[in-house]
Image (spheres, coloured by chain):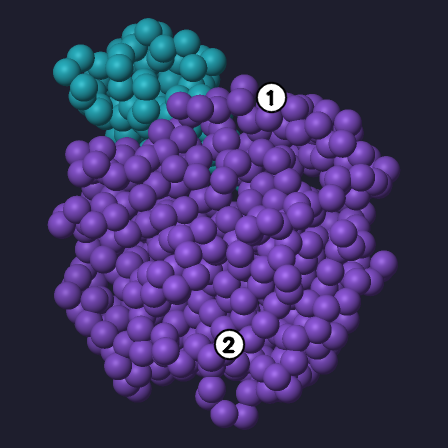
Amino acid sequence: MSFKVVLFGDLRKRLSNKKENIELNQEEFHSVKDVLDYLDIEVDEVSHIFLDHSYSDVGRKIESENERLALFPKDMALLYKWYFKKKE
Amino acid sequence: MTDKLLRVSVEKDSVSERDLPESYRDLGGRGLTSMIVTDEVPPKAHSLGPNNKLVLAPGILTGTSAPTSGRLSVGAKSPLTGGVKESNVGTSFGQTLHRLGYRAIVFEDKIKEKDFKYLKIDKDGAKLGDASKWNDMELYEAFEAIHNEFGEDVDVCGVGVAAELGGGNSGLAFDDLENKPSRYAGRGGLGSVLATRGIKFIIVDSQDAPGVEIEDEDEFQRGKEKLANALGEHDVTKPGGSLNAYGTDVLINIINEAGGLPHYNFSKGASEMAKKVSGERKAEIIEERGGDRPHPCSPGCVIQCSENWVQEDGEKVGALEYESVWALGPNCGIFDLDTIGELNKRCNDLGLDTIETGDTIAVLMDAGLLEFSDKQGALELMDEVEQKTALGRIVANGTQYAANAFGLNRAPTVKGQGMPAYDPRAIKGIGVTYATSPMGADHTAGYAIAPEILKVGGKPDPQDTKKGELSRNLQSSTAVIDSTGHCLFIAFAVLDIPEGLEGVVEEVNGVLGADLSVGDIDEIGSTILEAEREFNQKAGISKQEDRVPEFMEEEKVPPTNEVFDVPTEELEKVFK
């Protein structure tokens, strides 16, 4: 099963040809952190993480039903973080 | 120079100045507008009747060299909510007003005849003039004509057709830096309060203005430097940060991924289409067409999150902000920035609030008057307002009015005011603020300083779904920021860099010669909120109205499939 990783802002520079997203095989990634490692993105480069539109922690496990992971860089930390329940 | 309070009555052909009362000395912006309104307007007064008053007040720091401090507050009893209202705008107008020595202008008395005047203020004082020559002009044309007559350097405020109609969906337009009417105190229908006081335009001239007095220059400079450093260091507010690079519309992609970007009259919270109207896409178009981005809303802003949108024909028409893009775009099923830009310009021309207008169009689409995504139909609704037809009057009166007129229960409003661009089912914390703010559904009412920085209410647990106390603290600190004249976006920096907040307090102490501390912020904010809530209660707005609409408690919003399930007792705790 594949899932889509969507990058925003300067994080897109990590993908070739100015692509906005990449399809990855879910079975090869245990957690969001594994995806960051694969894309060579440090944890402290990322602000908001949404797994299937749910505000998530970097340690959150990627399940077979997950379809979309969105990653925003530090300078896009515009959400008022206390308003969200972060899933771990 | 003494700080002045100006009272204007067109009905009595009177303009009078006096010293600002001592009890108002430490107030500015929202603090001052709300205190004057709650002191002087009978809570049961009709908002368009003779006893309502409209107050303009620059923030305490507005007009000084404090960074990002160009905000002006407009207050009155709102035709939309029936309660006290403060609507806030970033514009050089407020800076000029304060530099001329005016801490507030109070417009009073309803005119008996529709004989509109303008008010001109300069270093020699204020006087009324006949505005009839601009009566038949929409606001872009009128602002140009006023600048042609009074000079390019004056600042202008105006109200449009929507205000003449007495609409709850009418704002006050202010100059942007290109002298176009694209900066708005849009919320709450306050444009119609000014129009019923007999004023269509206000012109302020900064030539030889004495400037804002600063009691303790050293303290002020110390504070200013701390805040400037915080804004310059923080990832979100620094030059080249996302607000600077993409503008407020950068929120489209973020809120869409959070599942909280309302689409099709709050029927879903995300789509693949949203990226077509994102800040990133808008910045690309502006660059391709030679527009201006980044761009400040007022001189001295270091964040510069605004822009000058360019139409396909090359004409620059002013700001096109996140809330406007969302309201006139995804919320109506429209994903075309040129159509959204045209709708935004029509709102500016007619004196309509873009958020309320987008909500209203979406409600009319939901009710079946036109289809979602019908761009031409949406633009034709603007023509209805211009022509003052019955349907146009419905649009000019806003979301709840339109829903009532067409028998639709899905009105996304609180206390009669249309919701901004965050679905409270996906973002429950902001839903608590929508529900409980004295201002009605207002995203800016609780978007400020972290409670642990203020050292009130303990450290919030992100996992805790109980948001009541958090919302109260945020509303309180927001009321204070709105009183300083700083833009709320400084909150991103002062959230994370405590010296930034210290700097704000030192700036205020420097201007006023006061001795406030960070710990005083909550008490000042609470005083403002208590006065606003007491006024609303006397006006007949009970705590039972501190709720989001019923359909949001029952109807799941995809893709999060959440309902608004914050318990009633939690909402009631906010101001207990």
Residue extending farthest to the bottom is B112
Residue B508 shows up from this direction: yes
Colour used to depict chain B in the structure image: purple
- Which amino acid type is marked by label 2? Gly
The residue beneath circle 1 is: B229
Left or right for A66, reference B404: left
Which quadrant of the view contains residue B490? top right
Same chain, labels 1 and 2:
yes
Residue drawn at the location 32% of the way across and 24% of the way down: A9
Q: Secondary structure at mark 2?
A: strand
Residue B551 % position (x, y): 43, 65
Residue B301 % position (x, y): 51, 36
What chain letter is assigned to the residue under label 1?
A: B
Residue B36 shows up from this direction: no
Q: Secondary structure at mark 1?
A: helix
Chain letter tied to cyan: A
The residue beneath circle 2 is: B129
Query: Mark 1 against mark 2, which lies toward the viewer?
Result: 2
Q: Are marks 1 and 2 in contact (CB under 8 Å)?
A: no
Residue B519 % position (x, y): 81, 36
Mark 2 surroundings: few (<14), some (14-19) or many (≥20) residues within 10 A: some
Residue drawn at the location 58% of the way across and 82% of the way down: B10
What chain letter is assigned to the residue under label 2?
A: B
- Which amino acid type is marked by label 1? Asn
